[in-house]
Image (cartoon, rainbow, N blue to C red):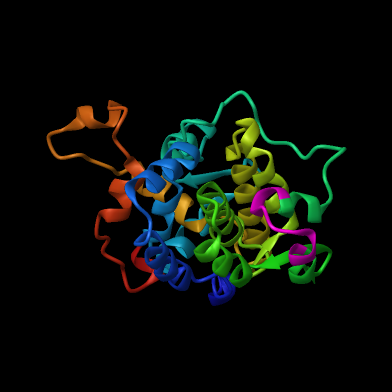
Amino acid sequence: MENEFLDKVENNVVVRTWSKKCNSRKDDEVKQLFYCNYGDLPYLLDIKVDEHLFRALAQFWNSAYSCFTFGMVDMVPTVEEYATLLRCPRIQADKAYSRAVNVLTFVKKLMKITGMSEQWVTAWIKQKGENKCIPWKSLRYMILAHPDTRKKVDVFTLNIYGLIIFPKALGYVDEVVIDLFEQLDRRVTPVPAILAETFRSLSVCQRTGEGRFIDCAQLLLAWFHSHFWKVDKVYYLVFSKNYSLLKELAATPRRDLQKKDGW
């Protein structure tokens, strides 16, 4: 892959710094509400994207079979593996997300998620290419000032989906992401949609030799590292209900190699 492969990926440093400031103002009850509804999602903010590893990994992507091919070994992220990493208790594996035919308008969806007025929502909507978006800075300020705790949690999570999991319009939350997020209340799993976008984006970048990876690089790298995971003398922890593999990966220091060839 050329150097352009990840040059335009949304840098999550600003988002992570802001989220820590936001979280410091929340009490344990609010944090519990977040994890009960959306699982281990915020740990993605603490996973650094090793661009050298990512470019090396992308070279082994086999577009014909939609998997990574390392010599005679094929590997591919599965629905079960991603669901285990995200560890969200509200997700039902047999209820996959699909875009409905008859849906609310973009304005109505945002009003439902944010609890804000139609006038406020309409004022912030922007057009990016073929899709409508809302800038994350407007949602950021709203989270800090919103009187409804549940709405704060919802909008914060929406930002993670728009900026980290599906960073399509940089600095904005895309209409397609909002459609997916609006359906999470029905306990659908977003994992198949995340995997589909991962496979599609990898294939496009592999074919062109450049471009921007439009999916969650942090989650893909967490999946890759999980195959080399070893819990020192406490293997049973991975079977514990309270054990978070994503949290453990986010907290584990990684030695970044200086060059892509090293990987």
Q: How many labels were placed on the picture?
A: 0
**Residue 199 lies in magenta, yes or no?**
no
- Which quarter of the rendered picture does the N terminus lie within? bottom right
Q: Check the image and name the residue furthest to the right.
A: 102
**Vertical arrangement, residue 89 with respect to residue 124, above or below:** above
* Predominant SS of the magenta segment: helix
Residue sitting at 27 percent across and 55 percent down?
251
Residue lying farthest top?
94
Is 119 within the magenta? Answer: yes
Coordinates of residue 39 in the picture (x, y in percent)? 44, 40
- Viewer-proximal residue, 212 or 238? 238
Q: Quadrant of the C terminus?
A: bottom left
What span is colored magenta in the figure?
A: 112-121
- In this orientation, does residue 171 appear? no
Q: Is residue 100 left or right of residue 258?
A: right
Picture coordinates of residue 193, whole percent (x, y): 65, 42
Residue at 41 percent across and 47 percent down: it is: 30
Front-lying residue, 160 or 1: 160
Residue at 65% of width from left, 54% of height from top? 114
Evaluate whether residue 57 shows in this view: yes
Q: Residue furthest front?
A: 147
In the rendered image, residue 22, in percent from the top left (x then y), is placed at: 42, 64
Say if 241 sits above or below 183 in the image: above
Along the viewing direction, whichever of 28 and 229 lies nearer the viewer: 28
- Looking at the image, residue 36 sits to the left or right of residue 195; the answer is left
